[in-house]
Amino acid sequence: MAGQDALFEYLLRLGDNALILGHRLSEWCGHSPALEEDLALSNVALDLIGQTQLWLNLAGEVEGKGRNADKLAYLRDARDFRNVLLVEQPNGDFAVTMARQFYFDAWHYLLLRELTGSTDSRIAEIAAKALKEVTYHLERSQEWVLRLGDGTEESHRRMQEAIDDLWVYTGELFDADAVDAAIIRDGLGPDPASLRDLWLGLVRATAEEATLSLPQPGWAQKGGKQGLHSEHLGYILADLQFLQRAYPNATW
Amino acid sequence: MTDSLTRPNLDQIRTWLDDVPDPEVPVVSVTDLGIVRDVRWDDDELVVAITPTYSGCPATSVIALDIEMALRAKGLNNLRIERRLSPPWTTDWITQEGRQRLQAYGIAPPAEEKADKPSPFDRFLRKPLTIACPRCGSENTARISEFGSTPCKAQYQCRACLEPFDYFKCI
Ligand SMILES: [Zn+2]
């Protein structure tokens, strides 16, 4: 795959992961179990939306067709989104939201850390900025996995269910395709497979301390990176894109 | 049109920026927080480089506007605000004056430790920070949440005087 095409695709993946997870977290605003958690979830969402702007603006710049972050976020159809399936999964209960966040944060942290060494200084700069924020996200989501896993009987049961149910979406994080191959070749980013051992190490250690059992690696649900999404993404976009679709170019 | 004879010098301009408050924590200025990274002349145009504290920080565009308005009020009309991402903002750039003002306002300033943590996952191995209560000074405090009213703050509570307070966390 040609370098520029792969780079555009890769930047969409980075931006769409942050956008869709940020949107999911924003759905909690006003509904969280406690005020502190409402603030925290909204703040993490805000960080992710900020990172979305940086990645998608760069994607638009690389594409060179005059699209910026807003156009890419609001005017693409589900088939053109490149986020992993994990981030579009429904919020469920608080345990599901935190398990999803922990799986993602641990991977996001490792990926961004590698991207700070990208041969493209624009990527390295955004990664360095985002990494500082994601370090706090990871600290927090790990803490919740520990608290709920090693908590009451009910919190343990719910966290165990969440860890089990979301497991099938974690394989995609480490799966490489032609886009990744071009990115690795050009020194722009890491081989996704190279992040797996460190990720698994942290997730295992956390699960153990939280008295949770981790499912065995097995069949993985994939496709999001190539635009093949679960039914959930369409509903997210209906909500996210409504205003710009109904009132094109509306501003405030 | 400003020519090099009548235009104010950069030190003068920096002192004007010292009076531009942060929109979210107005007791500290944009220079106290280390948001202003550079002030320079580009021919007749004044360029002020600013950096966001957090990538999603909604205050960044307000800060750019506040700086522009403050400088226009001083008669500088030919100016440009430049956004700079690298090196990423760190709480190490908050000045001593800024730290004292945060403390007096009731926000515990960032702990004095290196904000950069190079090795993987080492945050999870370090001991919890001791954050002193900005009101009574007690070190018997507990973290309530990693995030507070803005992304840059965490919520703590003092176990001595029982007051909740914000901690401006290291990044
Ligand atoms: Zn106190």
Image (cartoon, grey):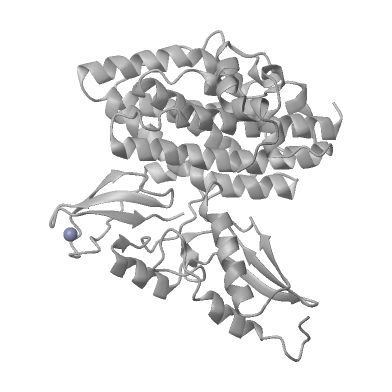
- The structure residue drawn at horizontal position 75% and vertical position 29%, both measured from the top left corner, is A9
Q: Where residue A191 appears, x then y in whole percent?
A: 68, 30
Residue closer to the observer: A130 or A76? A76
- Number of dots carrying numbers: 0
Q: Residue at x 77, y 34 (%)?
A: A7
Relative to B168, residue A124 above or below: above
Q: Position of residue B114 (x, y in %)?
A: 45, 60
| Frontmost residue, A160 versus A238 | A238
Q: Quadrant of ligand 1?
A: bottom left
Name which residue lies at 57% across and 72% down.
B70
Outermost residue, right direction?
A: A2
Residue A191 visible? The answer is no
Q: State left or right for residue B101 relative to residue A120.
A: left
- Where is residue B16, by image quadrant? bottom right
Q: Is residue A127 visible?
A: yes
- Extreme-top residue of the structure: A219
Residue nearest the viewer, comparing A237 with B113: A237
Looking at this view, name the residue that lies furthest to the bottom: B5
Q: Quadrant of residue A160?
A: top left
The spot of residue A212 in percent (x, y) is 33, 19
On screen, residue A43 versus residue B6, left or right, reads: left
Residue A22 vs residue B71, the one in the foreground: B71
Image quadrant containing the N terminus of chain B: bottom right
Residue at x 78%, y 42% (from the top left corner): A61
| For residue A221, side relative to residue B155 (left or right) | right
Residue B167, position as x, y percentages in the image: 33, 55
